[in-house]
Amino acid sequence: MNILITGGAGFIGSNHVRLLLDQSDDRIINLDLLTYAGNLENLAGLEDNPRYRFIKGDILDRALVRRIMTEENIQAVVHFAAESHVDRSVEGPEVFVRTNILGTEILLEEARRAEVDRFVMVSTDEVYGSLGAEGMFTEDTSLAPNSPYAASKASSDLMCRSFFKTFGFPVIITRCSNNYGPYQFPEKLIPLMIANALEDKNLPVYGDGQNVRDWLFVGDHCRAIDLVMRQGKVGEIYNIGGCNEMKNLELVELLVDKLGKSRDLITFVKDRPGHDLRYAIDAGKMMRELGWSPTVDFSTGLAQTVNWYLENRAWWEKIRTGQYQEYYNKMYGSEGRHDASMD
Ligand code: NAD
Ligand code: TYD
């Protein structure tokens, strides 16, 4: 099968490209714009694989997308490309609307025109909004996105739904919880805390650190997406979760202890505006209908992840200089939104 992966130079996309090249005979075409989050080093070693082609380009470039669909005879699309960081969406929502909503719509139209057999939309549990202390998100939970990021993903999900309902186009939506693992950009909680701790920098915990996330190892997520692409039912939504809820503060303490650093590095900073309290996924449908379940327990996954960041210091150190440093200073510096004065 010829599979178009969008956003395959990012965190989850690059893990997915590796999984497909390792475990299938499929031909993989990776379309990625290489924004700040896209990094060809995530795909190092794959350049000479005859089943793999990288194309630097924008999902908003309709002519390019059309050409790829026909020239490469695309049969399935797995759509990862997105602006993915909540804090950046608070600072500047426009690019989220362009990439996540309009970009998805262009891909859908061109995939439909090319009569592809499967379109997997990689979405997020954040479209459901926030939970209180009890309950879990199911596929029937109503949409209540709170951040511009979540609103843009909910919009792209609805566009996908409309293509199924209106045109019978074979779309499937997956909604997963927070991923962690190798190649995650160090603006997200786990890699940021690992890198800061290794450099003996402050560990900025938003608010009181009592927010809960449900952590899913990226390899388990990629296996789930692949099952959905091959065996999922078109028009359906599948929730994918790690069955592993944890409060942010507990997680940061665990990381600090694992790294043998002092908990004094933990600094409580001004909260994220609109910060969702808790996410928890009911992944029962994936388990019942597709026989999937997470295989990597959290302590194993976290140990693997910490080791990866220890062994690949050059990868994240390079990222943390230059443009990313400007972002970090803007967000976390003394004038930044997340500075340590909790007024
Ligand atoms: P990421 O930010 O690491 O990677 C996004 C990739 O998309 C980058 O390689 C970037 O260059 C590319 N991209 C951005 N705009 C593009 C454009 N206009 N055209 C082509 N490529 C473009 O993101 P990630 O964490 O790997 O997430 C992948 C997908 O999974 C996203 O759709 C995200 O919403 C979803 N998701 C992620 C998580 C998570 O925990 N990371 C959780 C739920 C859902
Ligand atoms: P993040 O990795 O940005 O994922 P998401 O917002 O999509 O869940 O954040 C995970 C949690 O960690 C979230 O509750 C916000 C919190 N957080 C911090 O406390 N400090 C930080 O520096 C970051 C980036 C996140």
Image (cartoon, grey):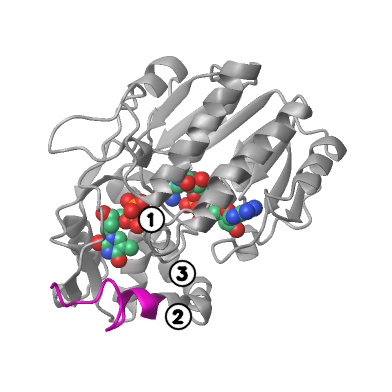
Question: Alpha-carbon neighbours of circle 1 within 10 Å: few (<14), some, or many (≥20)?
Answer: many
Q: Which residues are magenta?
A: 328-343
Dot 1 or dot 2: first in sequence order is 1
Residue behind mark 2? 326
**Magenta stretch secondary structure, dominant:** loop
> Residue 167, how many percent across, how many down?
65, 18
The reply, left or right, for residue 311 in relation to residue 23 is: left
The reply, left or right, for residue 318 in relation to residue 25 is: left
> Residue 316, how many percent across, how many down?
48, 72
Residue behind mark 1? 86
> Does the magenta-highlighted stretch encompass residue 25?
no
Dot 1 or dot 3: first in sequence order is 1
Q: Compared with residue 332, is residue 41 higher up or lower down, i.e. above or below?
A: above
Type of amino acid at the residue the image marks with label 1: Val
Contact flag, marks 1 and 3 (Cβ < 8 Å): no
> Does the magenta-highlighted stretch encompass residue 331?
yes
Q: Which mark's residue is nearer the viewer, 1 or 3?
A: 1
> Front-most of 252 and 342?
342
Q: Compared with residue 319, is residue 275 higher up or lower down, i.e. above or below?
A: above
Dot 2 or dot 3: first in sequence order is 3
> Front-most of 252 and 209?
209
> Residue 287, how many percent across, how many down?
38, 21
Residue behind mark 3? 311
The reply, left or right, for residue 285 in relation to residue 109 is: left
* Real-space CA distance between mark 2 and mark 3, rounded to the nearest whole angstrom: 25 Å
Query: Which residue is located at x 13 percent, y 61 percent?
Result: 208
The reply, left or right, for residue 206 in relation to residue 39 is: left
Tell me if I can see residue 228 in this picture: no
